[in-house]
Image (spheres, helix red, strand yellow):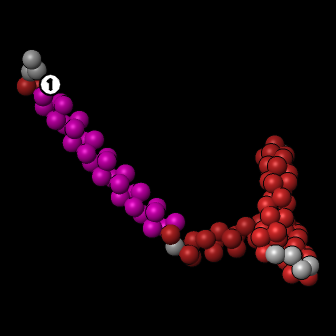
Amino acid sequence: MFQRKELAQLRREKEQLVFQSDAHRLQLKSDWQRLQSPGLWLDETLGLARRHPVWIAGLATVAGALVVNTLRQPRTLMAGIGRLGELASVAFPVWRLLRRKWRQS
């Protein structure tokens, strides 16, 4: 079957794979804890606001107008949520188109 040298080589490879697996497991655990941290999300949001202040101001204005419009009209909450869904279905393709243009330039 296998010679002693081949078995020793297979054992070394197995040990390497186990060590790599342990290292990947620890890295995954660390990344997961970092992603669950609210501070990370806050830092990312603030960084995005600093990089794109005009877009953030525009989105805040649109969101405020939608909230005021929803609260002003005597609709049910579900109708307002449906309307936001309709607007989101239009906004996402526009966002993707703009993002492609930004990446190309």
For image coordinates 12% across by 28% down, the residue present is 7
In screen coordinates, is 5 left or right of 17? left
Name the residue at the top extreme: 1
Few, some or many residues within 10 Å of mark 1 (<14, 14–19, 20+): few
Q: Position of residue 52 (x, y in %)?
A: 80, 66
Q: Quadrant of the N terminus?
A: top left
Residue assigned mark 1: 6
* In-front residue for pair 93/47: 93
> Which residues, given as a range, are shown in magenta?
6-35
Asked if the magenta segment contains residue 51, the reply would be no
Mostly what secondary structure, the magenta segment?
helix
Q: Position of residue 12 (x, y in %)?
A: 19, 37
Instruction: Judge whether residue 38 can be spotted in this image.
Output: yes
For image coordinates 35% across by 54% down, the residue present is 25
Instruction: Judge whether residue 64 can be spotted in this image.
Output: no
Q: Quadrant of the C terminus?
A: top right
**Which amino acid is tagged 1?**
Glu
**Is disc 1 placed on a helix, strand or loop?**
helix
